[in-house]
Image (tube, rainbow, N blue to C red):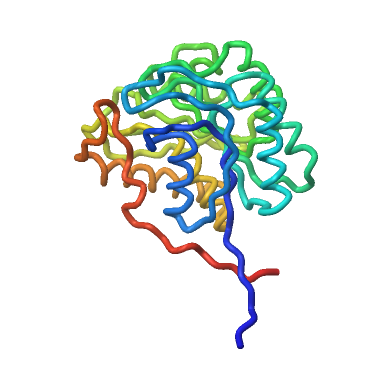
Amino acid sequence: MNTKKYRYPSVLTVAGFDGSGGAGIQADIKTISALGCYATSALTALPVQNTQGVRTIYPIPYQAVQEQIETILDDIFPDAIKIGMVHTSELVDTIVDTFARYADTPPVVFDPVMVATSGDKLIEDQTITTIVERLFPIAAVITPNMDEAAILAEMPVRTLDDMYLAGEKIQKLGCRSVLLKGGHLEAPRLISLYFEAGGAVREFSFDKFDTNNTHGSGCTLSSAIASYIALGNNLLDSVSNGQKYVHEAIFRGRDVQIGKGNGPLNHFFNPQQLTKYDLV
């Protein structure tokens, strides 16, 4: 009789809700599962949204957020953490203080969700300072898009040169590394810049597709990076592989119509079985 036991690499996502299934915690769970990891979650907010936009945002009590995180960490300790929508200073403090009570917190991928694909602003202005002071120091990598980089760097970000300057400014705010996504860049190819902890800057380039099906692409990317970390990859490889996954998920879903606005990605273009590791 085989009594050997195994475990799954797990990723905890701490993020907001999307009833339309394309973004937020739903996109995170799909991504983590598609890449062969076990997804756990803690809900930070209840946006009422669909592919056309965000109608309103209902808060989750901060005590409930704390207890959700504690309940997971006490039972299924993750190999990586993804943090998404944190729209108030009190919520940021709650999350950081909760993680601080646990030793050996795994790598954190922070997607500074500030503007939805539809253009709706999702964050309170006073929260940005708290994010910089408290979340940036615990994150292994943050993944702003150009709009979010403009808010964080306090400058227009419209060109590749702007991206280089903004990324440097954001990293100086206290980030270990920054992946600045150039999806809105007016260029023949998609370009992103990865500012490494050691000071190097790597440029990634991908084909562009004519599609509106990008709802939740930022959520998907940060979850993919966290999943690759949980699978044992180093940070650079996780950033690279995460972008490749998102690019392919957009490509495979480019011709599908789901909803009346910005449609979702095809997260399951190549689903993996749950990875099994020896239980130590």
Residue 114 seen in this snapshot: yes
Residue 167, x across and y down, in percent: 53, 25
Relative to residue 74, is residue 18 drawn left or right? left
Relative to residue 156, is residue 265 drawn left or right? left
Q: Residue at x 57, y 62 (%)?
A: 8
* Front residue of this view, candidates 152 and 194: 152
Residue 149 seen in this snapshot: no
Location of residue 116 (image quadrant) = top left
Q: Residue at x 58, y 22 (%)?
A: 59
Image: 265 above or below 9: above
Q: How many marks?
A: 0
- Quadrant of the rendering where the C terminus is positioned: bottom right
* Front residue of this view, candidates 258 and 192: 258
* Front residue of this view, candidates 65 and 77: 65
* Front residue of this view, candidates 186 and 22: 22
Residue 140, x across and y down, in percent: 63, 39
Residue 102, x across and y down, in percent: 78, 44
- Quadrant of the rendering where the N terminus is positioned: bottom right
Image: 246 above or below 3: above
Residue 142, x across and y down, in percent: 56, 33
Q: Residue at x 50, y 50 (%)?
A: 237
